[in-house]
Image (spheres, rainbow, N blue to C red):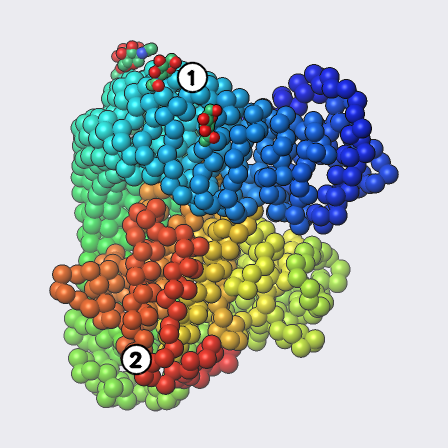
Amino acid sequence: MTTTLFASVITIILIVSTTTTVSLAAKNQSQFFSLIKDSLTGKYPLNWDEGKPLCHFTGVICNTKGEVISLDLSGWSSLSGKFPSETCSYLPQLRVIRLGHTRFNFPIDTILNCSHLQELNMNYMYQAGTLPDFSSLKSLRILDLSYNLFTGQFPMSVFNLTNLEVLNFNENGGFNLWQLPTDIDKLRNLKSMVLTTCMVHGQIPSSIGNITSLVDLELSGNFLTGQIPKELGQLRNLQQLELYYNYHLVGNIPEELGNLTELVDLDMSVNKFTGSIPASVCSLPKLQVLQLYNNSLTGEIPGAIENSTTLRMLSLYDNFLSGHVPPKLGQFSRMLVLDLSENKFSGPLPTEVCKGDALQYFLVLDNWFSGEIPESYANCMTLLRFRVNKNSLEGSIPKGLLGLPHVSIIDLSSNNLTGPVPEITGNSRNLSELFLQRNKISGVITPTISRAINLVKIDFSYNLLSGPIPSEIGKLRKLNLLMLQGNKLSSSIPSSLSLLKCLNLLDLSNNLLTGSIPESLSVLLPNSINFSHNLLSGPIPPKLIKGGLVESFSGNPGLCVLPVYANSSDQNFPICATSYKSKRINTIWIAGVSVVLIFVGSALFLKRRCCKDTAIVKHEDTLSSSLCYFDVKSFHKISFDQREIIESLVDKNIMGHGGSGTVYKIDLKSGDIVAVKRLWSRKSKDSAPEDPLFVDKALKAEVETLGSIRHKNIVKLYCCFSSLDCNLLVYEYMPNGTLWDSLHKGWILLDWPTRYRIALGIAQGLAYLHHDLLFPIIHRDIKSSNILLDVDYQPKVADFGIAKVLQARGGKDSTTTVIAGTYGYLAPEFAYSSRATTKCDVYSFGVILMELLTGRKPVEAEFGENRNIVFWVSNKVEGKEGARPSQVFDPRLSCSLKDDMIKVLRIAIRCTYKAPASRPTMKEVVQLLIEAKPRGSDSCNLSTKDVSNVTVLKKPYEL
Ligand SMILES: *[C@@H]1O[C@H](CO)[C@@H](O)[C@H](O)[C@H]1NC(C)=O
Ligand SMILES: *[C@@H]1O[C@H](CO)[C@@H](O)[C@H](O)[C@H]1NC(C)=O
Ligand SMILES: *[C@@H]1O[C@H](CO)[C@@H](O)[C@H](O)[C@H]1NC(C)=O
Ligand SMILES: *[C@@H]1O[C@H](CO)[C@@H](O)[C@H](O)[C@H]1NC(C)=O
């Protein structure tokens, strides 16, 4: 933004002040524009017409003599080709050239003879190649080469351009390591120095303190070492100082930074700073953002911070800070984020942080806080996350906290809280995760829990809860995790749990539950289920045992197995008495065609759920010709009639239900097959409608991100129909379903070369999203059930419902309310930070690699409580027992490709490193995977051709 401002100022000055004599340049100039149009093909503005005066062309500014002084093609992204060379032999008076957000090839050499050039802006061009010597561009004031892919030596000559005001090389990760010159203070007019993520190492020269014109100094994401020079305290105009993610900066935070009275934003996170936070910094009069997380700071938070009137974000997590937190922190300012997690703070929680009516994040988990949860937070209408887990808090949960309108995560677990779960009286439509486990909470689980209709995770385990499991829980249709183990719950298991189609983890163990296990739960197929140590009786539904879940039923003396099933299961349970004979007949049939069971089961289940849908479809049938106006957006060429699609939205075409809608497979008259996702209707009168806001967001995200991109490993969105009643997305159809099904449903066995090709394909798709687009896209929900397989088992990344397009510098975004990601695939930093980064996708991809290698699911009971496959694999591989990595490999892949698989295992482990910055980028992952290509020659009979070897074990029912 500043860049544009400077630029326009300069342009105006130039127009006024140019006094050059008229030359014969005019002819040369028009030649040059012909050259441009010959070499750069694509769409030009209408007024770029040969006959017209070129000084009137869009993007062109001339001086009073008719000489071009400014050429601004920024954002002309349709142009391709190579920019003509020798620009300034044609346009000798050129001052400004702006090409940001374009994709044509612009060799910088072409403007090296532009001795008058004052501004060169090439941001977001993703240009590769090395950079020339800039010494000839002596007049340069603005140099913005951010977001490119330059390699080789950093052009040190830029530090000789003493007129520079803006120097921006943000995000150029391909340079060789380089150091800041000690005489950097030659740039004495510099206002903005942005050298983030561009491979700087070594020390920060103290001479920077002499560039007192600096307003913005950003050196984050590099490999800087040593201490912060105290001379930085002389930068009296500095508003922004960013040194985060350097990992190796050490020493104290200089007291002198307290002299930076204009400072608004200070971020020194993810380094190795020690010592305490200077009081001088906490009293800076304009400071809004203070982020020092992930360092080794000690001592207390200076009391002066209580009096700040400007502070908005304070993030100090993961340090060794201690003592009481200033009790009135936030009393005079509009605090947005407070994150004190993972320190050693003790005493009471500060009470005034929400006083400014703006607080969104209150995160103090994993400290030694004691006392009660202040009532003031139950009135904090703006809260999104409230996490106080792992402290020593006592007393009861403030009434109203669970009913706050925007809150999405409440985590009170692992404290000493008592009293009941408060009734949910408010409208907590955004609450998606509620953790109360490991407290002393008593009483019954309130049926009003079902008002929090968007709950995804409930963990109330290890408390003193008694009474029934309310059957209303069945209304929480998004529920993914339900943990109630270790309480005194005493009802039967409500059969309404079978409505929880997204349920992934269900643990009811160690309670006093009675009655039988509802047969209907068989349709759920969660990853992990536990009914052990209760008082349950009667037959165990065969489908549940078959999933290898025998231990999930132990400790229930009354449970039995049906005779027909007894042979194949182990003999832990008695055979059911004849009184269950009527069921037995069913069971023979069921066991005989167990796969059909799933089909019938789910068909019935779907039918029940979808009668409403049918009604809507019929309704639309009558309307589609008249009232239902569809706004059709088409992205890829395919011929079909929207009516044909709408008429095919009937039950028999349903393939399944995704996170945001129902998916249909439709055979078009043309012979093509498409998949159609129908987002839940916005006008649904159902008792549990999806949040309309959520639907709109999901639709928008999906259409905007998918509609504009093409890659062989990204699912194709053909078009989108939307109307008031319904939203339909039409995709290419993927005959082999999801990777999850291929790996975990046991229908087929993919050999290693096929799995390897799937891994490489996904990596290429993600690398494209992260590195090859104008604005990188973070998918945020990478998991094997979002990877579709085409007829050749080539993978395609799908479901962009919560994808995020990174604009500009990304960062500082803390307003996302939709919880991203899926349990088991979520990067650990998500617990604290709402900053979406591409490294979160890298982590999730690492989890998929582990699934491919091990054949295991990301979360299995065997891994232990709150542990996922990453923990399990790393433990096996790096454990002390001299474990051999190959122990973790899928035993069904029992052949000699172990060495190749070990290479991929290493990549998987790197992708899932705890520190995001230690994870490779997707581009690097692709490279690493290519190096791990299976050699093909091995003793097994695996195909050496580049063709999938897929063994069909059981024929999946035709969907
Ligand atoms: C900068 O300028 C000085 C003096 O003109 C020269 O000696 C030096 O080589 C230049 N540095 C670079 C990197 O061009
Ligand atoms: C800052 O500039 C002054 C005057 O040119 C010089 O004496 C001093 O050494 C410089 N400081 C640093 C740290 O380079
Ligand atoms: C800067 O801060 C230090 C320590 O806080 C102080 O001693 C010094 O006088 C200050 N310098 C200026 C120029 O304000
Ligand atoms: C906050 O300001 C008040 C009033 O100016 C002052 O009395 C108090 O000492 C200040 N608190 C801290 C901790 O500096």
* Residue in the foreground of this view, choosing between 836 and 390: 836
* Residue 576 horizontal/vertical position (percent): 23, 84
Is 741 situated above or below 104?
A: below
Q: Residue at x 41, y 55 (%)?
A: 924
Q: Ligand 2 quadrant?
A: top left
Q: Residue at x 59, y 56 (%)?
A: 709
The image quadrant that residue 680 belongs to is bottom right
Q: Amino acid at mark 1?
A: Thr
**Is any atom of residue 202 visible in this view?**
yes
Q: Give the residue pinned by disc 2.
A: 895
The image quadrant that residue 239 belongs to is top left
* Residues under numbered marks 1 and 2 in contact, where contact means CB atoms less than 8 Å apart: no
Q: Amino acid at mark 2?
A: Cys
Label 2 CA crowd tier, 10 Å (few <14, some 14–19, many 20+): some
Mark 1 or mark 2, which has the lower sequence index?
1
Q: Which label sits on residue 931?
A: none
* Residue in the foreground of this view, choosing between 585 and 913: 913
Q: Give the residue pinned by disc 1.
A: 212
Q: Residue at x 20, y 27 (%)?
A: 275
Q: Secondary structure at mark 1?
A: loop
For the N terminus, the image quarter is: top right
Is 839 situated above or below 807?
A: below
The mark lying in front, picked from 1 and 2, is 1
* Residue 244 horizontal/vertical position (percent): 35, 35
Q: Residue at x 44, y 70 (%)?
A: 757
Q: Residue furthest left?
A: 881
Q: Residue furthest right?
A: 51
Q: Secondary structure at mark 2?
A: loop
The image quadrant that residue 186 belongs to is top left
**Is any atom of residue 450 visible in this view?**
no
Horizontal arrangement in the rendering, residue 905 relative to residue 310 (left or right): left
